Amino acid sequence: METRINVFEKGQKAISTLFGITSYLKKSELDRSLLELVEFRISQINSCAYCLDMHSKEAIAHGETTQRLFGLSAWRETPYYTKRERVALAYAEAVNACDVPDEIYEIARAEFSEEELIDLTLAIATINTWNRINIAFANTPGTYRVGQFG
């Protein structure tokens, strides 16, 4: 697949706002490994090859195992994830589908503080935006280097 527009060069004004959100989230109270799992899972659902490449590399660089990454699409059937990660993944999938039933919200609310839940929701919305940008402009997967965007 050939890149249609290099959004990182041509869209700097717009993209800088997304980098700001991403920077904020990296400093949030949410664990970095949890954020990487959620971003990887949503990128799987949205079929964003660029983001899958990026988040697999970042997750591994931050200590994630390949077994947990390979099993992520079947996280409900595997014993590799903590209760908090499972809740975050269920919540992320619901938000991604734009359908958050009360049951899932209440489980997430019991596991995360209000601020963490807001940040988790922002992370889900942001990875969706990144997925759509990278899919629309066909950014080439495999080119990302760990820490490339700070």
Image: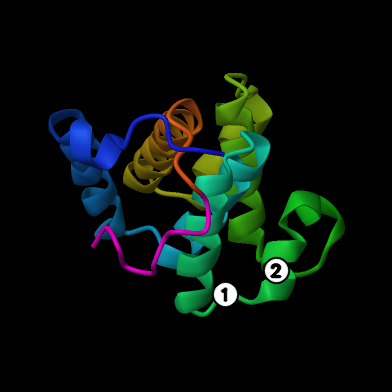
Image position of 112 (left or right of 114): right
Quadrant housing residue 64: bottom right
Q: Position of residue 63 (x, y in %)?
A: 51, 80
- Density class for disc 2 (Cα within 10 Å; few <14, some 14-19, many ≥20) is some
Residue at 72% in and 56% down: 72
Q: Name the side, left or right, on which 34 lies relative to 81.
A: left
Q: Which residues make up the magenta segment?
A: 141-150
**Residue 39 vertical placement versus 60 (above, below):** above
Residue beneath disc 1: 64
Residue 68 numbered tag: 2
Give SS at disc 1: loop
In the rendered image, the residue lying farthest to the bottom is: 63
Q: Which residue lies most toward the right here?
A: 77
In which image quadrant can residue 10 be found? top left
Q: Position of residue 9 (x, y in %)?
A: 21, 40
Q: Is residue 58 above or below residue 65?
A: above
Three-letter residue code for mark 1 = Glu
At x 30%, y 63%, the residue is 148
Q: Are marks 2 and 1 in contact (CB under 8 Å)?
A: yes
**Image x and y of residue 44, in percent:** 65, 44
Predominant SS of the magenta segment: loop
| CA distance separating discs 2 and 1 | 7 Å
Q: Percent from the top left, x then y, of residue 45? A: 66, 37
